[in-house]
Image (tube, rainbow, N blue to C red):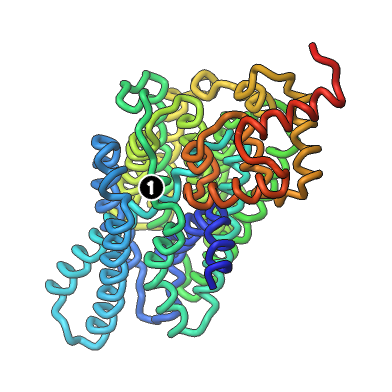
Amino acid sequence: MKNVLGKLFAQYPSLNYVGLALWLGWSAVAFSRAFEFYDFISASNVFGLFTFIQIGSIVVFLLAAVLPEQVSSRLLSPSALFASAGVATLCIVSTIALFELADEGAIGSSSYAAIYAIASILTGASLVPLFLKCIVPFCSQAPKRATLRFAQTLFQSGLYYFLVVGSPRIFSLVLFCLTPLLIVILQIPTRSSTAKPSAKSTSQFNRPLIGLFVAMTIYAIAMRIFEPYVASVLPRDSSMFVSSFSICLLLIVTIALVCAVVTVKGAFPFGRIYHLAIALLLVTVLSPSVFNSSPVMLSILCLAIVHFLTMLYRCILAYIVFQSGMNPMKLFGFGMAAISLGSLIGNVAGALLIRVASELELLYLLSFAMVFLCIIAAFLIFPESKMKALLLPVDEPALDALENKERPVKWWMEAAERAARQGRLSEREKEVFFLLVRGKSTQQIADKLFLSPYTVKAHTRNIYAKLDIHSRNELNDYVDKQINASQPLP
């Protein structure tokens, strides 16, 4: 059993990605109107759930942005994470039980509204620390690798979504309620990997970054304005189909993004992809009047683009953290608060338009006008040129060279690979081995690979035994001999 747990914990990065995938999948199920496991869920309940959860999320995201060091040390500790997951699970169970009581007429409308609002706000607030804990490992990876990891979590979240909405009612309820606790359990292997503030973590934001936050808020408003309209014209029996098909479309688009990331040489043009997605959003909301598209197709496209843009937001924020060394709590706190605030404003604005407009045609025109104005305003505030200025190119193949300037990089890497093959090191042992010969400490290796120091020490002992060496000096001499044996000294 101990060996099994050791092997499981050694895969922490993968477990952490699964944790974020569960968080994303839970959100997709909660807000997708796909609650087929209890039949009485209505569009108004989903609207209220989204609204109140966003309120709770905004508060905690801003707290993480203003007090990043305190959040890292307190809210992201193992005990605090378990407490947050417990509160989230309790609130989710209470909300579902509240639906049952309201459906049976056992609770008054005023009590129902008050309890529902409080439980939803607490759910949003308690889920934020789980997200922040899961997002930290992405910020230490170069942009392309981080994007591929985000794509990986998106596929895993899709599997979670279809597992929940396609399973029997009891299993779906249990899995949905226990997901926050499962996310925290996946964080157990790395209690020491909580984000530590860097020297730049207290620095002031520059103007391009502030412009990005403002643009993210406005774009989020544009993304969510159409949702109440779509919910009002969408047939009730098509909700499950729309939600599921939008997830499938999102996964297809993500495959295209992965192919682009892999094939494009040099820095990946996030700015172009970002504004292309915005253009697709504009074309989508214009489609009913120009292309005479159905409400079902409009809803599918809108949901897929919303999810895809949100993933790009996270990629961009992780890019900035990697490049600037800023505390991820601070940057993701303000960034995700901006997205949540925009989503909240957009959803409420769309609901108000439904009350103002007496006809669907007028409702559509008003919604489209607001979306169009938001997109134009955001693009003027933060055009693609500012995106390029903010996301400086990162030469990912040269990163290893910068970490080891004393040795010829090509020779050193070839020698290290040859030494790893001779010692028959495992893939994880190779990763630890490369960092050891670069002079990294046990704690530095643990932070970089998102392992516990005890796991790193265990891998180090195995490496020493396989290479028949006993110290760091002997390890460096071993690699130097491999270099001298194959290449002349410069």
Q: What SS does tag 1 mark?
A: helix
Residue 465: x, y in percent? 68, 49
Q: Residue at x 21, y 63 (%)?
A: 117
Q: Residue at x 66, y 17 (%)?
A: 406
Q: Residue at x 24, y 78 (%)?
A: 98
Query: Residue 127: which quarter of the image?
Result: bottom left
Q: Is residue 259 left or right of residue 236?
A: right
Q: Tell me the residue that label 1 is attached to.
A: 132
Q: Is residue 275 left or right of residue 179?
A: right
Residue 469: x, y in percent? 68, 41
Q: Residue at x 36, y 75 (%)?
A: 41
The correct choice, above or below, for 287 with respect to 260 in the image is below
Residue 294 seen from this side:
no
- In this view, which residue lies farthest toward the top? 490
Residue 294: x, y in percent? 57, 60
Quarter placement of the C terminus: top right
Q: Nearer the viewer, residue 11 or 137?
A: 11
Residue 68: x, y in percent? 29, 37
Q: Residues within 10 Å of mark 1 (few under 14, many from 20)?
A: many
The correct choice, above or below, for 146 with respect to 347 in the image is above
Q: How many marks?
A: 1
Quarter placement of the N terminus: bottom right
Q: Is residue 161 left or right of residue 43?
A: right
Q: Nearer the viewer, residue 89 or 140?
A: 140
The correct choice, above or below, for 387 with respect to 79 in the image is above
Q: Nearer the viewer, residue 271 or 316?
A: 316
Q: Is residue 3 left or right of residue 38?
A: right
